Amino acid sequence: MTAQDFIPKTYKSTIKNGKVTWESPSNIALVKYWGKKENQIPANPSISFTLNHCKTITELSYTKRETSNSFSFEVFLEGKKKDDFKPKIEIFFERVIVYMPFLKDFHFKIETSNTFPHSSGIASSASGMSALALCLMSIEKQLKPEMTDEYFNQKASFLARLGSGSACRSIEGDLIVWGESHAISGSSNLFGTKYPYQVHENFKEYQDTILLVDKGQKQVSSTVGHNLMHEHPYAENRFQQAHDNLEKLKPILESGDLNKFIALIESEALTLHAMMLTSMPYFILMKPNTLEIINKIWQFREDTGLHVGFTLDAGANVHVLYPKKEAKVILDFIKNELVAYCQNEQYICDQIGFGAKIINN
Ligand code: PMV
């Protein structure tokens, strides 16, 4: 597949107006994407768990219009007009118009809401951009009814990637790879693909409790962070390490070795933040409570031998990851000992999920 394959030739059908709704989940990377090339091509491959409860629900209404010289759309978040979302969507439309030539022929009303609290510090770009890409694909499917499900999902992921890189890993589940890796057959820089190898029972229904340590606006956007990898003194080693870690993860996922799994994901999380600490300019996204939580997790693990680990996004929140069979004791530990470090004691219980769903209007 190349990007050219996503440029449609002609559409046989025509449509006037309608409405489509998708719900699309967030995802949490185990091997992290940090650093990109032109056109949202990742500097290294990554792999993520698709989440189940943290989702964006987007309803897209479309009406055919007479003139078609510019984009015409309005955006609502939780029922309120959100003009500050418009520039990001305008950039997204600019990037994808070559693949979706009908975009200027319609007026769009984008109505979106999240299942997680607004400004919780959880990035809504992965779920939000994937939901929007899927809605656009549903329109294209009406223009081109012969499209296969495989093409639909690949192109949805391809478009989502152009909105926000990690969004391409939110279309399907439960483990998604993005970025070419010689270790993963079928992997692509253009879109996310399902992890194609055997995965041990231990990882079924894997739990992710998200501790909301800091709900404030991020001091540094991920776009700026990715760009700082261009001049970064450790970039090349980091990109190679991500390739190696993805390869090392294969036997771990197959055998269900939870100790090795935890060591790998925690190292990935801390390496991501180490890249931020060592860029120029440098920055720190962890908060004192992020470190308190990490230390508590390590102590609890040493005391009990249970398989609780953590990963981090580009922010202060902590994703606490653990197997379903140990969930009861670990959730008690989280409630009794970790929630006190969260802002307003807020946390979200999630688990591995299976991707986006269309909602019939
Ligand atoms: O999709 P972006 O550009 O917001 O980048 C997200 C990068 C991380 O969340 C930090 C890592 C990842 O692979 O999701």
Image (tube, rainbow, N blue to C red):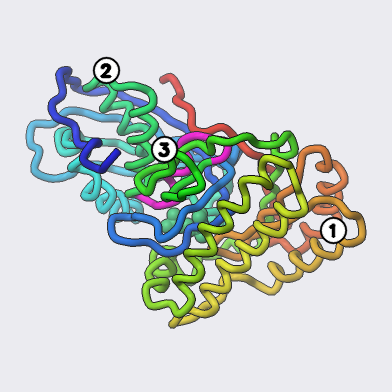
Residue at the image position 43 percent from the left and 77 percent from the top: 232
The amino acid marked with disc number 1 is Arg
Mark closer to the chain start, 1 or 3:
3
State the separation of the CA atoms marked 1 and 3. Answer: 37 Å
Indicate which label's residue lies in the foreground, 3 or 2: 2
How packed mark 3 is, by other alpha carbons closer than 10 Å (few <14, some 14-19, many 20 or more), is many
How packed mark 1 is, by other alpha carbons closer than 10 Å (few <14, some 14-19, many 20 or more), is some
The amino acid marked with disc number 3 is Ala
**Disc 2 + disc 1, Cβ < 8 Å:** no
Magenta region includes residue 169: yes
Q: Is residue 198 above or below residue 269?
A: above
Residue 6: percent from the left, percent from the top? Answer: 24, 36
Marker disc for residue 280: none
Say which element carries label 3: helix
Camera sees residue 125: no
Which residues are drawn in magenta? 163-175
**Disc 3 + disc 2, Cβ < 8 Å:** no
What residue is pinned by disc 2? 145
User: From the viewer's perspective, is 316 left or right of 9?
Assistant: right
Mark closer to the chain start, 3 or 2:
3
Between residues 243 and 69, which one lies in front from this camera angle? Answer: 243
The verdict on label 2 being within 8 Å of ligand 1 is no
Residue at the image position 40 percent from the left and 52 percent from the top: 165
Residue extending furthest toward the front: 182
Magenta region includes residue 279: no
Marker disc for residue 131: 3
User: From the viewer's perspective, is 156 left or right of 297?
Assistant: left
Residue 270: percent from the left, percent from the top? Answer: 63, 67
What residue is pinned by disc 1? 301
Residue extending furthest toward the right: 303
Between residues 285 and 4, which one lies in front from this camera angle? Answer: 4
